[in-house]
């Protein structure tokens, strides 16, 4: 069961690198706390999921890297290659020169259609390398232009082309006090589009991860590198191979499977069906015991509400709208997004 | 006849390129950056993919190291990854002031790249502003896109209707950096008359201008931005410089037009500077994507303050010899003799810092197209107040957080602004913080939290911050900060300008000099001042919202 990862934009690529690195470190970690056979099965499963056939003993990440400007991709490829432990495929990257200028409309309406073919071809090539494709993991931010806009476009396309495969989007929720001024616009446009085409949205808030770094890990000068590593660790443990129904040594459970049903866990659902507990004996990375909790709960209502509120205020003054209409995203599109998201907020609230 | 005062640039004939300018520094630079031609041609042929060091071994220091000064690195040949190139920008320097500032810019840019690019490889960062040319090739075919640096040519077009400044440049230490085919000069000058610059020379040189611009664009793989540098008070920079804007808009509609405009201060020697400025403002309103207004008084105040600090021997304020802030030489005694060089260097630093995140790596990049996207909420409101720190270096390198925080505080102080304005007591529409050096996201966030309470942001953009982190610090500093603010504090500058204009216009003083130019009528003046008034009115409306309580607007109600 393999997962093809799609890293989009600066954020997506920076995080993607850390994720593969964490996954690799985990699977090659000496401290196993389990039997050798167990470990081998685990390692094999890990490798198969995220890495493909090796070239000179160096595993190649099952990833497609996309960005609309070259600096980050070049850096990411280099970092991986220099590590000597794993790397990205030779032709797994696609980049352009100009960037998306933090403009969702540019990412979605200009870059998307323009580069649809080469990007989807790359994804297809990667998908074909998998014996059994369980789905796509798309890493993107909401605040910028490429990850958000192009990310939404590509996810939609994947929905059409690979309707039977699962698509999980890892979205990065920007800091509340601004990284990008139009981040709220970009966020609501992204969320509303992804809602229609993604199977699951895994959310990480920069603010939350930042707090983890500060409070739990006591890092004095938190850098994006620190934040990304914490994120990667979390994601790595979510994707840790776990036992499937067949029991030990069979790490075949579809890693994206549990999320297929995005239905809310309402009161009429029997309690034991509400939780999926996946176990594994093998320790994750350096830790003796670890638990990762992925929940679909109301926790997101407040941040979502805040973003929608801010975007709405800005929209009412029509600020920055001309930057979007320039590239074909009209006020109507904004209104559609607002409507959809208000519905989401209301639905979660009424649980 | 209008006095042929040299505009805001100052009167000294040897403002740039006199004997004292350290040629040896430039010689060293050119040596460092270009290699023996024979050697370079052979070695570049062995480079498999572009931008490599010719070996497949990983380089000495890790990529992404904090504060890493190695700039962009090549990829090992074994990777075989065809790198994408970045975008390029072209600088168009118009008039005396524009060319003087432009010259300082190119000087500093060369130094910066020399410091960052130790191996003399022509990489993406350099290519954003420089071409790599094999000077042995005659004609146009000499461009080299990869490998070692042979000879760097600035992506610049130099325009002046007098020969003085441009000639000095061509005889000075930077003469080899400019492509002689990219110059447009005349001898008679514009006589401090916007109409002469805009209409007479505009018409006369339109074809040539187009040709040079097209040429410079052809030399670019992917042209992203035109940087126009000029002054507002004179004739050439003001008139011809703004004529250029319309040409650029028509010919290259997709390419950003970012204009650095030096506004005349109250005691400007040029009597007609208000006319020139207002006529130019209309063009800026209509054809520029983004304007960075600067005024000489602010620059002068900054330099005076630096002088004071150095001369008073205050602790921790010794100017580092390599600092690019004060002058090309960096030696303190020279500063007194050439104040305009120091002032122009500040503006040059502004442009370098503005583009650093687009040229160099960082954990949160900011490309040039993001400036407009984030800082211009409505098309007409595209005037950005800039402030730059540090303007003088601190003696030690390992600076504890307090000093770093001081840098942020300084950026919001009046003393670091490049235009006389008070953003703290006016309304922010948006603000960008562009940080260079070993500064992390937490440092940035901490300071935003700290400074926010004392700043007022417009109701619909309460968290209107755009941030960027570039790992490469400027030469001679551990870090720096450029703050760009879209703030109603520019309004007083425009109001004052209008008042000065009206004082002249009411008396019809000197008007005949303009009206005698073909195509100029009184309506040009009235339209120009209307355009400015409309702009001022926009700012007024925004200011009116300042005292209003911030309320959330009623949201869409959904039937569940």
Image (cartoon, coloured by chain):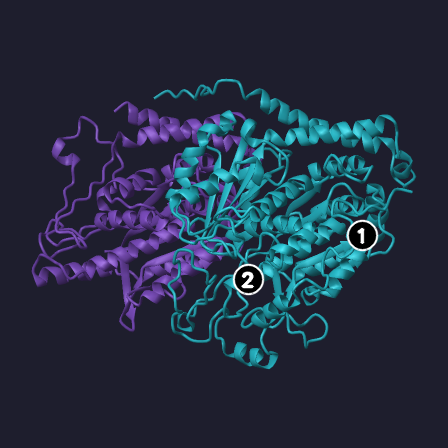
Chain colours: A purple, B cyan
Residue positioned 48% across, 26% down in the render = A313
Residue shown at 27% from the left, 30% from the top: A298
Residue at which label 1 appears: B206
Quadrant location of the N terminus of chain B? Answer: top right
Q: Residue drawn 25% across and 50% down?
A: A233
Q: Is residue B523 left or right of residue A25?
A: right
- Who is closer to the viewer here, A178 or B388? B388
Residue B270 image point, x, y percent: 81, 40
Chain name for mark 1: B
Residue A204, image quadrant: top left
Q: Position of residue A73 (x, y in %)?
A: 43, 58
Question: Relative to A340, does residue B99 appear above or below in the rendering?
Answer: below
Residue B411 image point, x, y percent: 52, 40
Toward the front, the furthest residue is B312
For the residue pair A172 and A241, the one nearer the viewer reads as A172
Residue B418 in view here = yes
The residue that label 2 is drawn on is B113
In this picture, residue B532 sits left or right of residue A191: right
Tell me the CA gap for discs 1 and 2: 34 Å
Residue B143 x/y as whole percent: 63, 70
Placement of the C terminus of chain B among the 4 image quadrants:
top left
Q: Which tag is nearer the camera, tag 1 or tag 2?
A: 2
B391 or A32: nearer the viewer: B391
Q: Identify the chain of the residue marked 2, using the numbered disc in the image.
A: B
- Residue reaching furthest to the left: A35
Check disc 1: other Cα within 10 Å, few if <14, some if 14-19, many if 20+: some
Q: Residue at the location (45% across, 37% down)?
A: A183
In the drawing, does residue B188 fall left or right of residue A155?
right
SS under mark 1: helix
Mark 2 residue element: helix
A25 shown above or below B418: below
């Amino acid at each position: 069961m393999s997962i093809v990862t799609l890293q989009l934009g600066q954020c997506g690529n920076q995080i993607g690198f850390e994720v593969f690195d964490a996954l690799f470190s985990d699977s090659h970690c000496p401290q196993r706390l389990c039997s050798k056979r167990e470990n081998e099965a685990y390692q094999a499963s890990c490798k198969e999921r995220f890495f493909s056939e090796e070239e000179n003993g160096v595993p190649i990440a099952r990833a497609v890297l996309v960005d609309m400007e070259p600096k980050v991709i070049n850096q990411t490829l280099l970092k991986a290659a220099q590590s000597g432990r794993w790397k990205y495929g030779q032709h797994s990257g696609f980049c352009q020169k100009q960037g998306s200028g933090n403009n969702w409309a540019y990412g979605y309406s200009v870059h998307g259609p323009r580069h649809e073919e080469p990007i989807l071809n790359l994804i297809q090539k990667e998908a074909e390398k998998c014996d059994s494709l369980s789905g796509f993991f798309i890493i993107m931010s909401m605040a910028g232009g490429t990850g958000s806009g192009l990310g939404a476009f590509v996810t939609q396309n994947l929905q059409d082309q690979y309707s039977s495969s699962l698509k999980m989007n890892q979205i990065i929720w920007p800091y509340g006090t601004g990284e990008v001024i139009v981040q709220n616009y970009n966020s609501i446009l992204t969320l509303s589009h992804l809602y229609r085409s993604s199977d699951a949205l895994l959310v990480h808030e920069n603010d939350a991860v930042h707090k983890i770094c500060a409070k739990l890990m006591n890092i004095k000068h938190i850098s994006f590198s620190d934040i990304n590593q914490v994120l990667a660790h979390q994601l790595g443990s979510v994707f840790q191979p776990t036992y499937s129904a067949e029991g030990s040594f069979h790490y075949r459970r579809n890693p994206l499977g549990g999320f297929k049903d995005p239905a809310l866990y309402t009161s009429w659902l029997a309690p034991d069906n509400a939780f999926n507990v996946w176990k594994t004996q093998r320790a994750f990375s350096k830790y003796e015991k670890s638990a990762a909790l992925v929940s679909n709960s109301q926790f997101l209502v407040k941040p979502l509400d805040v973003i929608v509120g801010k975007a709405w205020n800005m929209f009412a003054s029509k600020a920055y709208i001309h930057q979007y209409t320039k590239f074909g995203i009209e006020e109507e599109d904004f209104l559609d997004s607002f409507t959809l998201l208000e519905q989401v907020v209301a639905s979660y609230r009424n649980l | 006849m209008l006095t042929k005062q040299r505009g805001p640039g100052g009167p000294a004939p040897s403002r740039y390129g006199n004997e004292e300018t350290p040629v040896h520094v430039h010689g060293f630079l050119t040596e460092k950056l270009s290699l023996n031609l024979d050697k370079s041609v052979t070695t570049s042929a062995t480079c498999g993919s572009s931008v490599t060091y010719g070996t497949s071994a990983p380089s000495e220091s890790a990529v992404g190291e904090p504060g890493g000064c190695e700039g962009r690195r090549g990829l090992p040949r074994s990777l075989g990854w065809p790198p994408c190139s970045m975008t390029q920008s072209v600088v168009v320097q118009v008039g005396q002031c524009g060319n003087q500032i432009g010259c300082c810019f190119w000087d500093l840019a060369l130094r910066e790249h020399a410091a960052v690019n130790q191996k003399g490889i022509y990489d993406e960062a350099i290519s954003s502003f420089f071409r790599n040319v094999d000077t042995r090739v005659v004609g146009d075919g000499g461009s080299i896109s990869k490998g070692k640096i042979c000879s760097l040519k600035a992506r610049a077009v130099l325009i002046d209707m007098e020969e003085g400044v441009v000639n000095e440049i061509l005889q000075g230490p930077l003469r080899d950096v400019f492509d002689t085919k990219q110059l447009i000069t005349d001898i008679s000058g514009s006589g401090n008359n916007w109409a002469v610059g805009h209409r007479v020379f505009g018409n006369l040189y339109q074809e040539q201008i187009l040709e040079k611009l097209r040429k410079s664009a052809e030399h670019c793989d992917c042209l992203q931005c035109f940087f126009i540098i000029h002054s507002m008070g004179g004739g050439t920079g003001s008139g011809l410089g703004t004529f250029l804007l319309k040409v650029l808009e028509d010919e290259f509609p997709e390419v950003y037009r970012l204009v650095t405009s030096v506004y005349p201060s109250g005691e400007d020697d040029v009597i007609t500077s208000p006319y020139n400025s207002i006529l130019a403002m209309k063009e800026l309103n209509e054809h520029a994507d983004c304007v960075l207004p600067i005024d000489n008084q602010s620059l002068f105040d900054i330099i005076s303050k630096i002088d004071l600090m150095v001369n008073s021997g205050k602790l921790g304020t010794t100017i580092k010899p390599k600092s690019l802030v004060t002058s090309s030489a960096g030696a303190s005694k020279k500063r007194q003799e050439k104040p305009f060089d120091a002032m122009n260097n500040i503006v040059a630093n502004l442009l370098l810092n503005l583009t650093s995140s687009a040229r160099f790596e960082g954990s949160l990049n900011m490309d040039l197209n993001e400036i407009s996207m984030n800082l211009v909420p409505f098309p007409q409101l595209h005037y950005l107040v800039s402030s730059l720190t540090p303007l003088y270096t601190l003696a030690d390198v390992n600076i504890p957080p307090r000093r770093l925080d001081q840098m942020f505080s300084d950026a919001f102080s009046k003393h670091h602004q490049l235009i006389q304005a008070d953003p703290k007591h006016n309304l922010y529409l948006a603000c960008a913080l562009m940080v260079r050096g070993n500064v992390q996201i937490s440092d940035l966030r901490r300071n935003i939290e700290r400074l926010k309470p004392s700043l007022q942001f417009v109701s619909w953009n309460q968290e209107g911050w755009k941030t960027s982190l570039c790992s490469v610090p400027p030469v001679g500093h551990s870090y720096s900060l450029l703050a760009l603010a879209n703030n109603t504090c520019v309004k007083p500058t425009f109001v004052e300008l209008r008042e000065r204009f009206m004082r002249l216009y009411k008396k019809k003083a000197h008007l005949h000099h303009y009206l005698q130019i073909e195509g100029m009528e009184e309506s040009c003046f009235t339209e120009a001042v209307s355009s400015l008034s409309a702009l001022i009115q926009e700012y007024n409306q925004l200011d009116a919202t300042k005292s209003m309580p911030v309320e959330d607007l009623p949201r869409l109600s959904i039937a569940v």
